[in-house]
Each structure stands twice: as C-alpha cells, then as structure tokens.
Image (tube, helix red, strand yellow):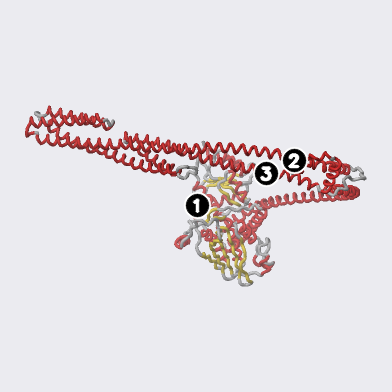
Amino acid sequence: MVRAVNSLIEGPRNPAMNTQRNTHRAKGLSVSAKISLGFLIVLLLHVSIAALSHYGMAKSQSDLKTYSELFREVEQLHEIDQTVGSLQQNVMLFAFTGYEGPERRAQELQDKLGQIISEATTFKYLDNRDDIYAMQQHLSTHREILAAVEVDRAKRRKLVNDVLQRHANEFQVGILALLENPSTRIMAEEADAAFTTAQLNLLKYVNTPDSTYFREAKSQLSLTKSHLEQIETLDGLDSQKAVEQTIVAINLYENAAIQMVQATRGYLHLVNVVLAGESVEFRRLAREIRSNQIEHVRVLAETMMNDNRHFQYASNVFSIITIVLGIVAAWLIGRNVVPPLNAIASTFDRLTSGEKINAIPALDRHDELGRLAMAAQVFRNKAAETERLLDVAENAREELNFVNDELAKQSELARRMAEDATAATAAKSEFLANMSHEIRTPMTAILGFAETVADDTKDEETKQAIETIQRNGHHLLSIINDILDLSKVESGKMTVESISTCPYTLITDVISLVKVKADGAGLQITSNFIGKIPKEISTDPTRLRQILINVLGNAIKFTEVGGVTLRSEFVQEGDRAMMQFDVIDTGIGMSDHQISNLFQPFTQADSSTTRRFGGTGLGLTISKRLANMLGGDLTITYSRMGEGSAFRLTIDAGAIEDIEYHDSSTLRSLMKTKSPDSKSAHRLHGVRLLLAEDGPDNQRLLKHILSKAGAEVDIVDNGQLAAERAMQAWRHGTPYDCILMDMQMPIKDGYEATRELRRLGYNAPILALTAHAMSSDEKKCKSVGCDGFLTKPIDRKLLLTTVRHWTNAAEYRELS
C-alpha cells in the first residue's frame, strides 16, 4: 500500500513514461478488478476499525459489568451497616419495654442480615473473605446473646408478675389479721405503709432500672420487718403467729426482688455491653469491606476512562487513513473508468433517441467497458430490427383489440346470464313459498272437515272414503314439504341448531310415530340399543327426527314381509363422539346400479318401483343432506335383491367430556313412562278465543274444532278488527285468553296487527296461523310478538294442545 502511494507521488517526475505505463496497466486490468482492489483496501481498513471498535465495546461492556457488580456489592455492604443499626435499635427497645413487636422485628432483621451476609460470600471482587466469615460468626453470637436476653426478660417478667405478687398477697393476708387487733393496729398500719412504699420503689425500678429505687425498696422492707418485730414484743403470744407469717412473706418478697434485680442487670449487661460490642464490630467489618470495594470501583473507573481515550485515538487514526486511501483509490479508478464510461453512456443516449451512430467508442478495450461498447454496437444493430418488429407489433395490437372487444361482449353476456340465474333463483323461492301457501290454505279446510266428518259419521264406507281423502291429502303435504326442504337445502337456507337432546326419548317418539304405519302394513318394528346410551347429546332434534322418520318410513314402504329394525349405538372416534343408527329391513332390496342412483333427487330404483310403491324420490336425498349438516352421513351398508337393505345414519353428538349414561333401571323407567291423557289436554272449557281469519271455510272449520272442545270463539276477518276487538275486551276487563292470528289478511295483516297490540302493551298469548311453512316464516312471526306458530293445514290435536298450553301458561299484566 505504501509503495502504491509512493508511486503516485513520484509519477509526475517522468510524465511520458508514467502515462504509457499507466495506460498499459489500465488496459491490462479489468474495471471490476480495479474497483475491487480499491474497495478491498478501504474494506480492510474498515474491518480493522470495526475489529478495534468491537474489542473496545467488548472491553467497555466487561468493565461496565464489573463496575455494576462492584457497585451492587457496595450497596449490599451499606445495607448490612443499616440493618445492624436497625437491629441494635430494636434490641434496645425490646430490652427496655419488653414488647413483642421489637422482639419479632429484631429476629427478622437477624434473618435478613444472615441472608445478606450469605450473599456477600459470593462476591467476586472481595479481597478478604475472612471478614465475611467473621461477620457470620458475630451474627451467630448475636443470635445466642439475644436469645439469652429473651430468657432473662422472661424470667424477670415471671418474677414481677407472679412471684412478687404472690408474696405480696401473703403479706396482705398476715397484715390484715394484725389490723383487726386494736392493740396492734397502729404498728400494723405503719408496717403496711412501709411495704407499700417498697412495692412502689420496686415498680419504679422495673420501669427505670436505677439502683436508688432498689436500695429504697430494701430500706422500706427492713422498716416493715422492724414494725412487725415491735408488734411481737408489745402483744406477745397473741400476735406471734401472724407476725411470723408476715415476716416470712416479707423475706420471700425481698429474695424475689433481689432475683429480679439480678435478672435485670444481667440482660442489661448483655444488651448494653455484649450486643453493643457485637454491633460495633459488625459495622466496622462492613465499613472496611465497603471501603475496599469503593477503592476497586475508583480504580476501575480510571482504567475505563484511559481505555476509552486509547480506543478513541486509535479509531481516529484508522479513520483518517481510510479516508485518504479511499480518495486516492477513487481518483485512480475515476481517471481510467469515468471518461470512457461517460462516452459509452452518451452513445446509448443517442441510440435510444433514434440517432444514427457510425463509430462506437472504447471498442479496443478488453475489459468490462470494452464489452459494454460491444453491447452498444449490438444495440445499434438491433435497433433496425426493432423498428421492423414494431410494425409487426402494431398489426398484432389491432388483432388483440378485436379479441378484447369480443371478450368484453362475452363477459357482458355472462354477467346477464348470472343476473338471470339469480332472478330465477329468487323467483323459484317466491314461487315455492306461494305454492306452499296456496296449497296449504285449501288443504286446511279439506283435511279439517274430513276429520270432522269422520268423527261424526258412523257409516264404514263413508269413513273409508274420508280416510282415503285424509291419506292422500297428507301424502300431498308430504310431497310439498319434501320439495320445500330440498329447495332450502339447495339454496343454502336450511339451518340446523345444536341443543341438548335425550336420544332415548327421541328414538321412542320416532318408533311410536312409525309404528302405526308398520302395524297397518302387518310388519314388526323393533328398536335395540347397543352398549351404553348417553343421557344427552348435542344436535338438532327436529332434523334428526325427520331423518329417522324418512329412513324408517322408506324401509316400511319397501318391505312387504318380515319387519324393520332400528339399532342405536354411541360411538367414540378419537376426540369425536358420534351417534350411529342402523335401519335394517327385509324388503325388496336393490341392485348395484340402483344403489348408485339412490341419493339422486326425484330418483327411485326404477319406474316400476314408482308405479308399485309411489313416492317422489326426495326423502333419502333430503335425509342425506340433513345428515351432512348434522356432522355425519347417511349411507347404505348392505342391500341384496329379494333379501333387504341396511342403511346407516351417523351424526355428531357433540363434546365427549363429562358424558353421563342411562343405566338399565333408568331405561326401564323411561320405557314405562306413559303419555299424559290426550283428552284432558284437548279440553278448552271456559276458554275465550279470538279467531282472526279471512277465509270463510277455515273460519267454520276452526270454530267447529274449538267450539267442540268447549271454547268460546269470536271471529274477525282482518287484522284491524282483531286489534280493535282485542283491546276493547282488554279495557272492559274481559280479555281473550288467546288470539289465533292469520298472518295474511286484508286491510291490515297479522304481522302489523300483532306488532300494534304488543306496542300498546297487550301481553296475552297470540298464536300465528299461516300457510307459509318456512323456518324463516316462524322467525318472522315471533319477531313481531307471536308466542306460538301453527302451519296450515291445521292438525286438530296440535291446535288444541297448543291453545291449551298457552292459555294455561299465560300470566296477564294490566295495561298501565
């Protein structure tokens, strides 16, 4: 590096020779080599500066860490000094007061001091660890002496509170006997006064350990004994026994007082002399160690300052050298690289502007600039080719515009088709809802009056004809319900809920519903439970019941001989809990081809099956999709022509934590549970009802059913009259027990009438009557204030049971 700088300095001595040599060298080295060489020199210097800085930072961090540890050690030693002072204060306070608080505080301070000293033994920069061990010995001695002080305090407390008081009581017994004797009373009173003075001085000594008080107490005790001896010489044998007993009590009292003084002097000596000396030695050792550590801190701080100055000086020197060499390297590179580079850049600018250029600079170079010049020459040659290709691209652009126009037309056509599909879907939903309403409304009168006529007629042929009407009417409703369910599933409007459900009760209900159909077909239907059955599962009971009824009904329909079996089992698959239902029949069975089309809508085994057994082919399709929505599936596990079929339904049963199972006794009790008396549930004697219905046929039918059950029925044919009649009866104190509200009526429909009644504060039950059977219709009715929801055609038993329920459960509130 030094030789390179010297050569630069000596260069001007022979300009011609230097120019030739530099030109040759410049052409011999590539541009990247020249730039790399210059940057390598600068990089090495930067690396040196970085290494120096890193070493300096590491040294500073190490010194700072050492400084922090030394400072922490000094702080802990200072804390020892403060703790010793607090300890001595609490010991003195305990010695003179005897309170438990200073005693406990002194023990806590000893524990704290022991912890701090234990931590001090781990100091890294401690010169003399013997001082720490000496402090531990002093702390152990301090504990022992404090324990001895506590023993002496306890001994003195016992002497003052127990022994002295007992002997004082003995003295009082003897002196009372002498006070009762008239001949000894005066001397006894003087003896009693002297004893009392002695007690008072002893109490003063207890509070303030001054020997003057104790000497005065002894003097008064001697005076007391002198008075007693005088009584003995004056009264003779009559008072001798009492005097002797009293003198013995005084002697014992005096001995106890002497012991008390000795105990006091003992623990005061320990506190004032021994413990004080230990504390002084403690603090001396702590201050010596702290002084040594402070000196370490001072020396370390000076060392850190000197190191920082040295590192700063070295860094400045390296930085100056880096700057100088960087300038020199930049000048050398710029002289050989920048002029030809600018010439080539100018050439490229002229070429890009479309200017014709005959000569390309720097073509004779063999470095990167030479290759760049060659690239400029290639660029110039390609320019003509580019102009030719531009003409081709213009033609291609026109063709692309034509294709884009066609694509836009197709996109617009697709958008219109999507809008038409959306409109068709909406029209389909509206058509299905209206179809349901228009069919259910007349079916209410047809099925209702058919049931009424069947109840009143006794002619068997007429009854059979009416049963045919009812059977086909219900079949028509079943077809409508299947079509609506399939429509809701396909449109994504079908929803399921998850609530706690007893599987045993649900299965029992399903079996009771399909048993009538099985008995009519001469088939045996059985239900078996495999393993333990949980008391509750989490699913949608309505949809589960619908699936089971569909599958069991399908099995009964296609079985002519034998029976149908429902097997229920609770299955755990890892962290999932599933309910599994197997429906096995002995029916006609299916072929493999028929099985492949089984779950397609509007599909049965073949046309002959449809002609023979009837049906739309929607039941299994809907059931499978509902099973998927319940977290499971509906599959066929076995089928053979002429032998029967087996279907398996699985659903998600919810969480598997804390599952409780039915035991055998519970299942037996559930099997024996009887349903309530249906007749009592259908009686409505004394019930006043308001029927809001605009259809005359439905008016007559509903009034006939309700009146026959014993209810009093008033009829209005629009929502406005319903609201007026209900509020009028309410205000006159004769409110209706329940309102049956048709939701589609002239003038004011049921929705608006119900909303108005609830706004006015009407709180009696309102039951919605509607031919719209969608779940969204039920939510809409309840959102305006309806309590119950009944769909047309009306089921007589369900109608009477629902009215009975709401008239029993209603709690009326007066309007404010």
- Residue 649 in which image quadrant: bottom right
- Sequence order check: which comes first, mark 1 or mark 3? 3
Give the residue at mark 2.
326
**Where residue 673 sits: x, y (%)?**
47, 59
Q: Which residue is mark 1?
A: 683
Q: Residue 32: x, y in percent?
A: 79, 47
Badge 3: few (under 14), some or many (20 or more) residues near its Cα, within 10 Å?
some
Residue 131 is situated, as x and y percent measured from the top left of the image, at: 42, 42
Amino acid at pointer 2:
Gly
Numbered disc in front, either 1 or 2:
2
Residue reaching furthest to the front = 13
Disc 3 target residue? 48
What secondary structure is found at the residue carrying circle 3? Answer: helix
Residue 708: in sight, yes or no?
A: no
Measuring from the top left, give residue 577's x and y in whole percent. Answer: 55, 59
For label 1, the crowd category at 10 Å Cα-Cα, with few meaning under 14, some 14 to 19 and many 20 or more, is some
Who is closer to the viewer here, 481 or 652? 652
CA–CA distance in space, label 1 to label 2: 110 Å
Disc 1/disc 3 C-alpha distance (Å)? 105 Å
**Amino acid type for the residue under numbered disc 3:** Ser
Residue at 67 percent across and 44 percent down: it is 48
| Sooner in the amino-acid sequence: mark 2 or mark 3 | 3
Q: Residues within 10 Å of mark 2 (few under 14, many from 20)?
A: some
Left or right? Give the position of 739 relative to 164. right
Query: What amino acid type is highlighted by mark number 1?
Result: Arg
Q: Nearer the viewer, mark 1 or mark 3?
A: 3
Residue placed at 31% from the left, 37% from the top?
270
Using residue 476 as the reference point, say whether residue 787 is left or right of it.
Answer: left
> Under tag 1, what secondary structure?
loop
Does any portion of residue 524 appear in the rendered image?
A: yes
Quick one: 132 or 266, which is closer to the camera?
Answer: 132
Q: Residue furthest bottom?
A: 642
